[in-house]
């Protein structure tokens, strides 16, 4: 009888060991139990761009809790990228996210084949050969810019009807960092959104030649206000332009349209609405992919271009924030939603389209007649519309 018991116990142990081995194999094939994730920021969370990106990190922590360990490096300039990059990869990060613009990421990725490197796109990647573990991504920001322009146009139209300004004073200002295609694409979509409501509107652009300087951005906004601009927007990182608008006297109120970060607290009277790129869908999807040992581009929902992905309102990669109902014109929300519905249906050719001719500021021989619609982000997540429509846009 004892032999029978011993045989039974041994059989059970063998079966148990087989099950343990089987489930271990399943776990190896199916994914990881934990992840080590790195983040490298070009600034810190006091700036709108980095704060907005950090929201994706917060979403990761809420979703995974103790299953992930997050390591963060802030205020890393592009030419200082190598040391923190090697440090995080050397510590065994399974995936690292970057919001900077350094080519070092792509160059160093092959040295760490067990780490996935995910960088916000900083150039047209459609003709690039990149390492298999290097990925780029960006929300199709022009969509939010266009919808923001509709909100601005509705306000200007109200000001004209109320007799506060005349049609020839339908002037908006834009505080811009650098004359890159990313910035030019954004401010062009903005003014075209404005002109979809107020066809006489025009825009003045003032470059600061820095991404983040409160003093320079506020000063640029004030110059545009002094030039007669009645609404200001920006593609820079600080609250300076919003503060400049908020400080204008009530009898000559200038309104503000934000980007990346809500300005409702710092500019409660002048702020109309804000658009932002929502980084969460990509960051969460990429982490899910690495956790399950799958290719990132097979998991993240977006418009895939090789190892590069973009998306807009259709996938939740672009959002509108804090519509100020006390300041915006009547029916603004309906006008915005009508445009957003088009984007969600996949219709995008109505943005960069019209009786306009754009000129490449770097090569005036290159032009684009917008009678033929320009399809932004068609082949790459990085914005490529790099033509200034001189008839309606002037650079200060």
Image (tube, rainbow, N blue to C red):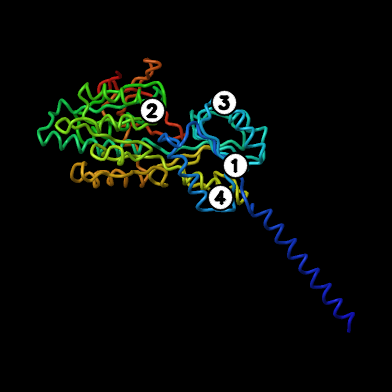
Question: Tag 4 or tag 2, which sits nearer the N-term?
Answer: 2
C-alpha gap between disc 1 and disc 2? 28 Å
Quarter the N terminus occupies:
bottom right
Mark positioned earlier in the residue sequence (1 or 4): 1
Q: Whole-percent x and y of residue 50?
A: 45, 36
Q: Nearer the viewer, mark 1 or mark 4?
A: 1
Mark 1–mark 3 Cα distance, whole angstroms, equals 20 Å
The residue under the point 14% across, 28% down is 167
Crowding near pointer 4: few (<14 within 10 Å), some, many (20+)? many
Instruction: Find residue 80 and name its label.
Output: 3
Which of the two residues, 266 or 49, is positioned nearer the viewer here? 266
Callout in the foreground (2, 3): 3
Which of marks 4 and 3 precedes in the sequence?
3
Asked whether the residues under the numbered discs 1 and 2 touch, taking CB atoms below 8 Å apart as contact, a structural biologist would say no
Contact (CB < 8 A) between labels 1 and 3?
Answer: no
Instruction: First in sequence, mark 2 or 3: give its number.
Output: 3
| Frontmost residue, 363 versus 156 | 156
Mark 1 vs mark 4, CA separation in Å: 11 Å
Give the label, 1 or 3, closer to the camera: 3
Residue linked to disc 2: 183
What is the x, y in percent for residue 391? 25, 21
Between the C-alphas of marks 3 and 4, the distance is 29 Å
First in sequence: mark 1 vs mark 2: 1
Which marked residue is nearer to the observer: mark 1 or mark 2? 1
**Dot 1 lies on which element?**
strand
Cβ atoms at labels 2 and 4 below 8 Å apart: no
Classify residue 131 by image quadrant.
top right
Q: Which residue is mark 4?
A: 288
* Helix, strand or loop under label 3: helix
């Amino acid at each position: 009888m004892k032999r029978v018991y011993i045989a039974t116990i041994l059989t059970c142990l063998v079966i148990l060991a087989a099950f343990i081995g089987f489930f271990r194999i399943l776990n190896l094939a199916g994914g990881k139990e934990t992840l080590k994730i790195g983040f490298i920021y070009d600034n810190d969370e006091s700036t709108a761009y980095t704060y907005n990106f950090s929201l994706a990190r917060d979403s990761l922590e809420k979703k995974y809790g103790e299953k992930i360990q997050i390591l963060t490096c802030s205020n890393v300039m592009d030419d200082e990228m190598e040391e923190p990059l090697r440090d995080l990869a050397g510590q065994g990060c399974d995936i690292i996210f970057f919001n900077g613009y350094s080519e070092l990421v792509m160059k160093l990725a092959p040295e760490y084949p067990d780490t996935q490197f995910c960088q916000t796109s900083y150039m047209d990647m459609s003709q690039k050969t990149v390492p298999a573990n290097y990925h780029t991504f960006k929300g199709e920001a022009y969509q939010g810019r266009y919808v923001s322009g509709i909100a601005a146009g509705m306000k200007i139209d109200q000001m004209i009807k109320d007799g506060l300004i005349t049609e020839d004073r339908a002037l908006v200002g834009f505080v811009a960092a650098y004359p890159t295609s990313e910035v030019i694409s954004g401010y062009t979509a903005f003014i075209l959104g404005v002109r979809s409501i107020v066809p006489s509107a025009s825009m003045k652009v003032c470059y600061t030649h820095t991404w983040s300087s409160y003093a320079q951005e506020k000063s640029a906004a004030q110059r545009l206000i002094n030039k007669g601009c009645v609404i200001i927007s920006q593609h820079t990182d600080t609250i300076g332009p919003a503060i400049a608008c908020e400080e204008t006297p009530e009898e000559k109120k200038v309104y503000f349209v934000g980007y990346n970060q809500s300005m409702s607290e710092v500019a409660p009277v002048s702020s109309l609405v804000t658009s932002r790129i929502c980084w969460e869908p990509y960051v969460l999807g990429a982490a899910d992919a690495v956790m399950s040992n799958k290719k990132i581009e097979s998991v993240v929902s977006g418009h895939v271009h090789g190892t590069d992905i973009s998306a807009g309102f259709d996938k939740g990669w672009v959002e509108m924030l804090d519509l100020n109902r006390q300041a915006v014109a009547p029916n603004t929300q309906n006008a915005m939603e009508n445009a957003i519905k088009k984007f969600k249906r996949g219709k995008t050719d109505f943005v960069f389209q019209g009786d306009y001719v754009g000129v490449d500021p770097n090569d005036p021989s290159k032009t684009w007649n917008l009678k033929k619609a320009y399809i932004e982000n068609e082949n790459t997540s990085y914005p490529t519309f790099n033509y200034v429509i001189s008839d309606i846009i002037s650079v200060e």
